[in-house]
Amino acid sequence: MPERNRPLVFVSGPYSAPSEPEEQVNIRRAVDVGRAVFQKGYYPIVPHLLVREYYIHGDSGLFGYESLMQYTLAILARCDAVLLYGHSPGADRECRAAEELGKPAYFDIDQLPDLSDQEGPGADSGTEGRAGGSN
């Protein structure tokens, strides 16, 4: 599949933890899931990596939890699907938002269809049902 045609999959799972080492484990797990998503032919969007510095260094008014949730929900709205690999209040909220937006939600990497061997324009599912030929 041409790189530009890869669908975007939002990787959703726990971020916050009682301690910094546990939080690092959560981030590492999200990155590992993102790698698996990429290997299946998608571009992973791993919000854990996008909010990390803001969450640590930001103040609670500008970059607090709710502000960052709104940020990740805005990104999720632009994705094609969500993969929820673990539960937390934020991840469950992201999953509900995906469902409200009509986006497919997967709960295991094995549920995500494998697109890695598809090639050529229109290889992704986003072209189904389009009328007419190529421009």
Image (cartoon, rainbow, N blue to C red):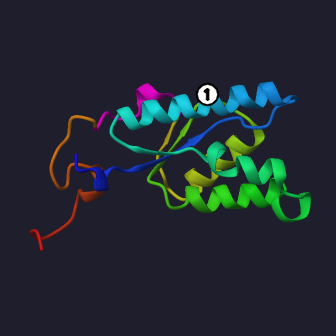
Side of 81 relative to 131 (left or right): right
Q: Residue furthest left?
A: 133
Query: Could you tell me the amino acid type at mark 1?
Result: Arg
The mark total stands at 1
- Residue 89 % position (x, y): 77, 41
Side of 130 relative to 126 (left or right): left
Q: Residue furthest bottom?
A: 135
Classify 130 as above or below 72. below
- Packing grade of label 1 (10 A; few <14, some 14-19, many >=20) is some
In the image, 124 versus 67, the foreground residue is 67
Q: Residue furthest right?
A: 60
In the image, 99 versus 6, the foreground residue is 6
Q: Main secondary structure of the magenta part?
A: loop
- Residue 133 % position (x, y): 9, 69
Range of magenta residues: 107-115
Residue found at x 78% / y 25%: 22
- Does the magenta-highlighted stretch encompass residue 110? yes
Residue found at x 78% / y 61%: 67
Residue found at x 48% / y 55%: 79
Classify 103 as above or below 41. below
Mark 1 lies on a secondary structure that is: helix
- Residue 9 % position (x, y): 47, 46
Classify 108 as above or below 104. above
In the image, 59 versus 18, the foreground residue is 59
Q: Which residue is mark 1?
A: 29
In the image, 52 versus 82, the foreground residue is 52
Side of 22 relative to 71 (left or right): right
Classify 97 as above or below 61. above
- Does the magenta-highlighted stretch encompass residue 39? no
The quarter holding residue 69 reads: bottom right
